[in-house]
Amino acid sequence: MTSEERNVLGGPLEPCGTDPLTGFYRDGCCNTGSEDLGSHTICAVVTAEFLEHQRSIGNDLVTPMPQYRFPGLIPGDRWCVTAVNWLRAYEDGAAAYVVLASTHERALELVPLEALREHGVDVPADPTGLGAD
């Protein structure tokens, strides 16, 4: 894992979320490596529909699991999800939104860029500039 990690748009990988602290390595980014067998590479903004879909396929993202430093998610949280599970939700019509600048390029090994773009949202890393002047 290096600071040269790239996103699906070819730029530097931006942080996904720190509240709750996400990422396979719990570093706030969707970094990946050989230990990350699930490829937690997609920065999702989860919806109630996505969370219910994940629970229906055996991936409970709502129940806190402190032993894994997992707080449980609520709609609107940003979380690094596995490419396989996101793709399954996409195919089932329940895909979460995707922050493309924070989605690791390795997600493209499993998920087409067009599918990610279809659900892409632009969430700046520093939202302080969004206020009225």
Image (cartoon, grey):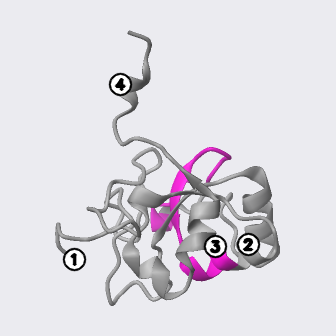
Mark 4 surroundings: few (<14), some (14-19) or many (≥20) residues within 10 A: few
In the image, 103 versus 120, the foreground residue is: 120
- Identify the residue at image location x=18%, y=70%: 4
| Quadrant position of the N terminus in the picture | bottom left
Which residue type carries mark 3?
Trp
The residue carrying mark 2 is 89
In the image, 74 versus 12, the foreground residue is: 12
Q: Position of residue 83 (x, y in %)?
A: 55, 78
CB within 8 Å, label 3 to label 1: no
Sooner in the amino-acid sequence: mark 4 or mark 2 = 2
Which residue type carries mark 4?
Gly
Can residue 82 be seen here?
no
Which residue type carries mark 1?
Met
Tag of residue 51: none
Sooner in the amino-acid sequence: mark 1 or mark 4 = 1
Q: Secondary structure at mark 3?
A: helix
The residue carrying mark 3 is 86
The residue carrying mark 1 is 1
- Identify the residue at image location x=32%, y=83%: 33
Question: How far is mark 4 from mark 2, CA to CA?
Answer: 33 Å
